[in-house]
């Protein structure tokens, strides 16, 4: 019987399959924009501006009240090219695809998948809604229900809500809820696998070792708002420890006394203080002043309102967590909160072989290029992906402090 050699396309397709199976957080985010980076004859560069639909206030009664249609956009930038380089002997290529995958593809592509997933979890820094106490692992169902409550207050659709948690979060909540009444098969699965599975309003609970740990900034002083009637994406403050670097760290969350959040659709007060996330590290000057870049922007009226009112002068600023607290960040999110884009890479000429899998159903684009080394009778090859993430609707996500 003749030998069956593994072709480059077989190897590449198996690589794509393994990559999808190894993705955790990244497998649950929106992927619908991938095709835009594969338009033949009309390449768009490395940035796609994702348009967000306008919002409207509406009217009551007969009188016409024309509203401006204001669209906004979020850039999806393919920032990272990552790969693993391998070399196969000619003998290796007569193995069955299962053996070949186990020996070579699985370890290499698992590294690529881990890199993509790890980069994606850094999106927590763009998410301002946060539930839980930094430094304390949540051990009650109520905490997870409050996360779902916050998503609902932000008009998040009920379907496609996912929850990624750390190993410590998973172990703690499974133990805490092991005695609750639910279907027998659910209890059996939870017991056998040590995982929560589906429940408490989430389509799935996913244990992800790539979730980040946030360290709260050193803070210092008694910070307050410096100037009334402020709006927009920055906040002028004072009262910080003077001339200190990194008083606030990117990803820190804070509230302002007297400034509540509103529902994005009906603009009603949710009854909770609006949380803001710090968009970049913040230093204080010699007088203890600091201007904080924030998200969401302070918007007090119109279809994109985020708060009930602008902050008062000298309103107190309260940062979530004590200075220097290390707090692992779980993430609950709707699939549309974040987007992952991958692009087709060029297939070069003058090599032994080159192939690419750009599978919309798989949601990946993986390229493998193979050369021939006559001195060693082997085939050096490189596996590459090009990708980027964007927080399109960060209001459809909520961090879970731990």
Image: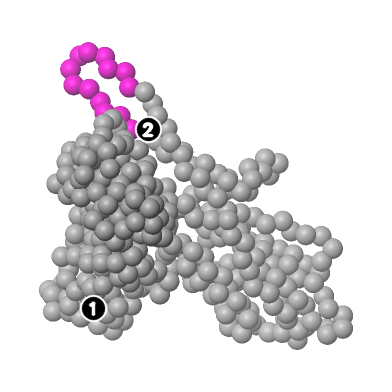
Q: Position of residue 94 (x, y in %)?
A: 72, 83
Horizontally, residue 5 falls left or right of residue 229, namely right
Query: Which SS class for mark 2?
Result: loop
> Which of these two is toward me, 399 or 27?
399
Asked whether the beta carbons under mark 2 and mark 1 sit within 8 Å of each other, the answer is no
Q: CA distance from mark 2 to mark 1?
A: 42 Å
Q: Is residue 247 visible?
A: yes
Split into 4 quadrants, where in the image is the C terminus? Answer: bottom left
Q: Residue at x 38, y 26 (%)?
A: 69
Q: Which residue is mark 1?
A: 172
Residue 66 belongs to magenta span: yes
Query: Which SS class for mark 1?
Result: helix
Q: Which residue is mark 2?
A: 54
> Which of these two is toward me, 398 or 91?
398
Residue 301 belongs to magenta span: no
Q: Is residue 330 visible?
A: no
Label number found at residue 160 = none
Q: Which residues are magenta?
A: 54-67
């Amino acid at each position: 019987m003749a030998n069956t050699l593994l072709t480059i396309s077989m190897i590449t397709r198996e690589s794509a399959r393994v990559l999808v199976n190894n993705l955790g957080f990244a497998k649950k985010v929106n992927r619908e924009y991938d095709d835009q980076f594969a338009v033949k004859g009309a390449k768009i560069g490395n940035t796609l501006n994702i348009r967000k639909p306008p919002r409207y206030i509406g009217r009551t009664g007969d009188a016409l009240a024309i509203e401006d249609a204001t669209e906004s956009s979020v850039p999806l930038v393919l920032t990272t090219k990552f790969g693993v380089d391998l070399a196969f002997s000619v003998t290796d290529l007569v193995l069955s695809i299962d053996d070949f995958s186990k020996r070579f593809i699985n370890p290499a592509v698992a590294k690529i998948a881990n890199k993509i997933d790890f980069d994606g979890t850094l999106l927590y820094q763009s998410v301002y809604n946060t539930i839980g106490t930094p430094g304390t692992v949540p051990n009650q169902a109520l905490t997870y229900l409050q996360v779902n409550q916050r998503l609902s207050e932000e008009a998040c659709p009920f379907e496609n809500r996912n929850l990624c948690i750390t190993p410590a979060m998973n172990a703690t909540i499974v133990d805490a809820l092991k005695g609750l009444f639910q279907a027998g098969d659910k209890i059996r699965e939870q017991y056998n696998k040590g995982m929560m599975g589906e429940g408490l309003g989430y389509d799935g609970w996913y244990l992800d070792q790539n979730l980040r740990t946030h360290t709260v900034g050193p803070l210092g002083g008694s910070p307050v708002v410096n100037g009334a009637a402020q709006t927009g994406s920055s906040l002028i403050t004072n009262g910080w420890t003077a001339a200190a670097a990194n008083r606030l760290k990117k990803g820190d969350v804070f509230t302002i006394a007297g400034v509540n959040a509103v529902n994005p659709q009906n603009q009603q007060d949710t009854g909770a203080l609006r949380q803001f996330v710090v968009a970049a590290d913040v230093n204080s000057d010699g007088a203890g002043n600091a201007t904080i870049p924030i998200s969401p922007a302070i918007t007090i009226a119109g279809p994109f309102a985020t708060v009930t009112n602008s902050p008062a002068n000298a309103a107190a600023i309260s940062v979530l967590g004590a200075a220097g607290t290390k707090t692992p960040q779980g993430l609950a999110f709707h699939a549309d909160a974040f987007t992952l884009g991958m692009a087709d890479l060029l297939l070069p000429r003058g090599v032994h072989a080159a192939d690419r899998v750009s599978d919309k159903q798989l949601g990946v684009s993986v390229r493998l290029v193979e050369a021939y080394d006559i001195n060693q009778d082997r085939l050096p090859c490189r596996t590459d992906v090009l990708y980027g993430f964007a927080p399109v609707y960060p209001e459809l996500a909520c961090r879970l402090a731990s």
